[in-house]
Amino acid sequence: MLKHHNLRRLCTARDKLRTEDASITAIASAIGMSRFHFIRLFKSVFGETPHQYRVRYRMEAARRQLVESHQNVTDICMAVGYVSPGSFSAHFSRRFGVSPAALRERATRDGNDPTPHCITLLNAAWTTESQFSRSETDPD
């Protein structure tokens, strides 16, 4: 049976996996566990190894950013913890079956444009000049 303090330490470690680029060994040491024990407990609680969790978390974050933002692929690659755009693209393609650029293109084509809806409405309204222009007879 997993003790409460071990569960708390595992949750702390999971947070570190999301926010820090420390090694699995360093994270295990920081929460007072051996690398082996940490990996074993982590997998028993979360269903995947710490490395698998980190990679999945980073890939999901990248996928979200590709669909929801206008950031370029290299910036997203760096933001999620990869140093090589080529390595990032290869991992991304393996996980999702499509390259980062192709995912963005598909999302934009299918109506998942990262431009907020309110901006889209304003742009549409501004193209209809009469809605926002004042006539010469309107009082100030």
Image (cartoon, rainbow, N blue to C red):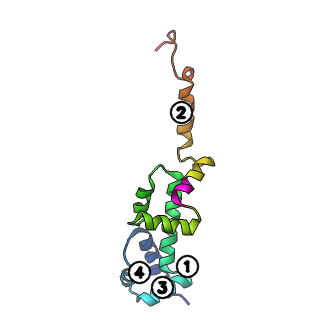
State the separation of the CA atoms marked 1 and 3.
10 Å
CB atoms at circles 4 and 1 under 8 Å apart? no
The circle on residue 123 is 2
Secondary structure type for disc 2: helix
CB atoms at circles 4 and 3 under 8 Å apart? yes
Where is residue 53 drawn, in percent x and y?
Answer: 51, 74
Q: Residues within 10 Å of mark 3 (few under 14, many from 20)?
A: some
What's the magenta bit mostly, secondary-structure-wise? Answer: helix
Where is residue 82 drawn, in percent x and y?
Answer: 41, 66
Image quarter for residue 32? bottom left
Residue on which disc 3 sits: 39
Q: Residue type at mark 2: give it.
A: Asn
Q: Which mark is first along the chain, 4 or 2?
A: 4
The circle on residue 46 is 1
Q: Residue type at mark 3: give it.
A: Ile
The circle on residue 55 is none
Q: Is residue 77 left or right of residue 109?
A: left
Q: Which mark is first along the chain, 1 or 2?
A: 1
